[in-house]
């Protein structure tokens, strides 16, 4: 009897009651609008489906390509990201094909599902009107070039299962059904193995659930511990399974080094003052031309203090916002696409802000309440118009240059050249951080170091990594050797170790000939037989081919 009574109190105290939610057929209007939002955002993504892969996408696509070939992560290529994102890319490519368009179409579906989850989340903790404002805001901000939104970064793949897990957690709060709590934990565990910052969403869900449970005066410590352990069991299962799989295929040691040992060095490298400067620049970039839309979130914050209806949700919203922001912070780098982690919280505040304004107008004069929706539509439309050239006019390659201004459009041409002038058994080495070239060429890297950033960082493994990369290249004797003379591909720092550059100068002279360049001062030729082949456009890449008479060493 006592237990049953306790469960009833959980439902009574913790269940969120929506305010003035329309019933019956009027609810279909919100679903029609939601579908329209999803289709509109989908149209933008479809138009830019062929946008060239950037570095992170190239890494994920190459690792996914290796998985589809039966090669596990961290065996022949390594990086500090957890393997869930590689598996996600492998799955997408197995369904939609190993192409840029296939990858981005899979990403389109993930983003569409996340928009729907944002609607369901806001609807559950507030109402359908707030849900529509929230989902529409999230949709347009998530595709914004200010957060590099057309690129399938790991942050989007973290949000998808994280939001699903949080929804199940809220359902467990309302229904007191342990199965919802367990499966919510599993989904949140999946968000963590997509990328390490997913752990902050796990922490939020656990704390909020325990907070809701703890509001019962007669909730026993045993019940709190039992439910907390059940949630953690679900959350830890995906990570444990990943560890067992990687241990079984013999790469657990490298996996642990890259994702935890080296990663801990990476996140502790940047000084706090530099991190604060990076935050200001990163936030300004992430907001971009959507400053009016972001500004509405301020009304949402005010509503949490001033509005009685909204105040009952303050614990959830503040907790969600704080932990979402912390997901942006590891390493204090604050790159624009990291702010994707924060978009759900920001857009939820936007939805709350517009709903707050609507209630204020309703109290002032009922006929004025529609002004809140009209104001939102004006801000929403103006924000889109400010990026209209990007959303509706630019070709995929031009859109890529608009966001990155780098060699990503040329990488495809470089990869296709290598594919046409090599065999499947040939290996290539890229001295620089351009893993998309491996994916485009469908050739294996001669070294596991598909990024050279770690080699330039002021961390204790830097020189060791440089020597390992050199040793792996010399052992593999790659057919093509590509040197990227671009700082964004290295991030050389003042105190960076330069050992690998000195080695490269001698190694290329002894064994390789220049066959291609992005330097416009070199006269174009015909490739292997007719002199250096000239790729169009930029001038910071050189490609060398190993001489046939080069001795084995």
Image (tube, rainbow, N blue to C red):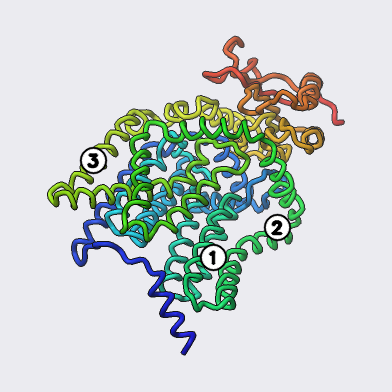
Q: First in sequence: mark 1 or mark 2? A: 1
The location of residue 62, given as percent across then percent down, is: 60, 43
* Residue position marked by numbered label 1 in the rendering: 185
Residue 273 appears left or right of 399: right
Residue at 20% across / 42% down in the picture?
A: 374
Residue at 46% across / 29% down in the picture?
A: 403
Query: Element at badge 1?
Result: helix
* Residue position marked by numbered label 2 in the rendering: 246
The location of residue 115, given as percent across then percent down, is: 38, 51
Q: Quadrant of residue 40?
A: top left
For the residues bearing labels 3 and 1, Cβ distance under 8 angstroms: no
* Residue position marked by numbered label 3 in the rendering: 375
In three-dimensional space, the C-alpha distance between marks 3 and 2, rounded to whole angstroms, equals 52 Å
In three-dimensional space, the C-alpha distance between marks 3 and 1, rounded to whole angstroms, equals 39 Å
Residue 435 appears left or right of 53: right
Residue 443 appears left or right of 497: left
Residue at 58% across / 64% down in the picture?
A: 235
């Amino acid at each position: 009897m006592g237990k049953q009574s306790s469960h009833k109190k959980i439902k009574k105290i913790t269940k969120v009651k929506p305010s003035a939610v329309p019933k019956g057929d009027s609810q279909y209007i919100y679903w029609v609008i939601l579908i329209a939002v999803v289709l509109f955002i989908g149209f933008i993504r479809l138009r830019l489906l062929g946008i060239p892969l950037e570095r992170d996408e190239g890494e994920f696509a190459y690792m996914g390509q290796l998985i589809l070939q039966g090669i596990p992560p961290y065996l022949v290529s390594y990086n500090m990201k957890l393997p869930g994102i590689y598996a996600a890319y492998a799955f997408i490519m197995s369904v939609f094909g190993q192409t840029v368009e296939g990858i981005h179409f899979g990403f389109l579906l993930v983003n569409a599902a996340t928009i729907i989850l944002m609607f369901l989340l806001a609807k559950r903790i507030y109402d359908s009107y707030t849900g529509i404002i929230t989902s529409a805001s999230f949709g347009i901000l998530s595709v914004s070039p200010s957060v590099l939104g057309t690129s399938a970064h790991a942050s989007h793949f973290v949000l998808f299962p994280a939001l699903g897990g949080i929804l199940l957690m809220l359902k467990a709060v309302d229904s007191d059904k342990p199965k919802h709590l367990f499966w919510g934990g599993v989904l949140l565990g999946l968000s963590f193995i997509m990328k390490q910052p997913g752990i902050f969403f796990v922490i939020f869900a656990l704390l909020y659930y325990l907070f809701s449970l703890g509001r019962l005066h007669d909730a026993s410590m045993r019940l709190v511990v039992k439910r907390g352990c059940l949630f953690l069991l679900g959350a830890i299962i995906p990570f444990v399974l990943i560890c067992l799989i990687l241990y079984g295929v013999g790469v657990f040691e490298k996996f642990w080094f890259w994702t935890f040992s080296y990663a801990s060095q990476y996140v502790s490298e940047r000084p706090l003052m530099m991190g604060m400067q990076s935050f200001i620049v990163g936030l300004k970039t992430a907001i971009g031309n959507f400053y009016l839309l972001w500004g509405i979130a301020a009304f949402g914050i005010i509503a949490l203090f001033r509005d009685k209806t909204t105040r009952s949700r303050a614990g959830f919203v503040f907790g969600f916002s704080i932990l979402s922001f912390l997901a942006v912070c590891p390493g204090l780098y604050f790159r624009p696409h990291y702010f994707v982690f924060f978009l759900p919280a920001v857009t939820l505040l936007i939805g709350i802000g517009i709903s707050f304004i609507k209630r204020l107008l309703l109290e002032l004069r009922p006929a004025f309440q529609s002004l809140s929706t009209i104001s939102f539509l004006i801000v929403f439309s103006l924000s889109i118009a400010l990026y209209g050239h990007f959303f509706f006019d630019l070709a995929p390659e031009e859109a890529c240059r608009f966001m990155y201004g780098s060699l990503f459009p040329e990488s495809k041409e470089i990869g296709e050249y290598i594919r046409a002038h090599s065999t499947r058994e040939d290996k290539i080495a890229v001295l620089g951080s351009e893993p998309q070239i491996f994916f485009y060429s469908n050739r294996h890297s001669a070294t596991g170091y598909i990024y050279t950033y770690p080699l330039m960082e002021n961390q204790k493994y830097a020189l060791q990594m440089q020597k390992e990369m050199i040793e792996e290249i010399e052992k593999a004797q790659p057919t093509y050797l590509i040197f990227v003379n671009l700082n964004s591909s290295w991030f050389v720092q003042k105190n960076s170790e330069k050992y690998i550059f000195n080695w490269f100068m001698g190694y290329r002279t002894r064994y390789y000939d220049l066959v291609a360049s992005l330097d416009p001062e070199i006269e174009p030729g015909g490739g292997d037989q007719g002199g250096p082949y000239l790729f169009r456009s930029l001038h910071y890449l050189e490609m060398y081919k190993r001489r046939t008479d080069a001795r084995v060493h």
